[in-house]
Image (spheres, rainbow, N blue to C red):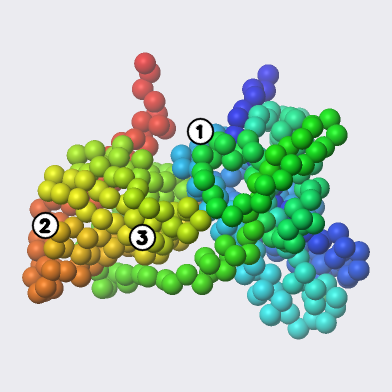
Amino acid sequence: MAETKHGYLVLADISGYTSYLAQVELDHAHGILSDLLETIVEQFKPLLTISKLEGDAVFANVDEEQVTRPESLLELIENTYIAFRRKRESSQRTTTCTCRACQNIGTLELKFFLHHGDYIVQNISGIRELVGSDVNLIHRLTKNHVTENTGWKAYLLFTQTAMECLKMQLDGLHPQDETYEHLGTVPTWTCNLIPRYEALTSAHRVTIPREEADVVTIHEFNASLCTVWDWIMDIQNRNKTMGGIGSWTVISRGEGNRSGAGSVNHCAHGKGISQETILDWRPFEYATVESVDGPVTFHEMLVFEALDEGKGTKLEARVKMLKPKPLLLARLMVKMEFRKKNPYKMWFDEIDKILAQRDNPSPS
Ligand SMILES: [Zn+2]
């Protein structure tokens, strides 16, 4: 018997494809489409299970308990949109072909649908498929009135149910009820991906090259990129793993009430309170922050890298001192302190323990 699962259902749908296909050369169009679908699948992989490729769409899911930080799901979708745009633009730029398929690549767009619900993983003759009324619903949602009412061509549509499960207060969403035969009225919320794309791709990059860092701590985790990112970057998760070192609170979030550049966190610890401001936020790749703790100011860059086909993650923490002056002395002090007791090491070891417990729960 297949058991009913709960989780998020995600559908990425390349729009404009049907009319595009009708009027262009099939072999080139097919090549372009499979490149774009492959790009979507690659981006989805760190968090989602691909359920099915559906011609011009990718259908995927993730069980609820695997999402430790809901915003990661949004960030994964935004990253996918950025990768799609890059692929589309590079294909367009590099082609010398004058056929209509190659000339019209730019008319293809990408829409995402996110729903939360129940599904059964059905396995018939080795063919795995998700079934259930919520699976039907997300597919029905591709026929909606969003573009008609907003003019938006690239968007992320959440059902009300998904929105409630994500527990996020996002700004600038378009509310709309859609009605479908047998399913009734479905309240939805839609986010325009174009301004998000522009903000994310134009955001200033702040990095610390390894050779400029005063201390570098490297650790390898036995978990996927998204999982490690969530344990390191999420404030609630930090409080579970940094117990002895500090207690964190979110003071303010970035634009659109999202995690990102400009967000501020406080950390109360033995000696006082330090303030962390996020300078650069590139989910699952790196984050750079500025920390001010009394007279001390430093920058910290956390660099994430997938290992072992996504089963593991390498994390590199780079610290660069900025204050107090004279800097030479501050740099020397931090090196000495870290040699005596590396706070990252304690934190990372604690995360390792939790991950090991999760993978091998002790019988109770
Ligand atoms: Zn062509």
Residue 113: image location, x then y, percent: 68, 47
Residue kind at label 3, given as amino acid type: Ile
Residue 101, percent across and down? 83, 72
Against 23, is 167 above or below?
A: above
Mark before the other along the chain sequence, 2 or 3: 3
Q: CA distance from mark 3 to mark 1?
A: 27 Å
Q: Is residue 290 left or right of residue 66?
A: left
> Is 274 drawn above or below residue 63 in the view shown?
below
Which residue shows up at 71% across the image and 45% down it?
A: 176
From the image, tell me which residue sits under label 2.
337
The residue shown at (80%, 57%) is 148
Evaluate whether residue 139 shows in this view.
no
**Label 1: which residue?**
65
Residue nearer the viewer, 341 or 219: 341
Residue carrying label 3 = 278
Label 3 or label 1, whichever comes before in sequence order: 1
The kind of secondary structure element at disc 1 is helix
Viewer-side residue, 165 vs 327: 165
Left or right? Give the position of 170 relative to 54: left
Given the image, on which type of amino acid does mark 2 rest? Glu
Task: Assess whether mark 1 and mark 2 are in contact (beta carbons under 8 angstroms).
Answer: no
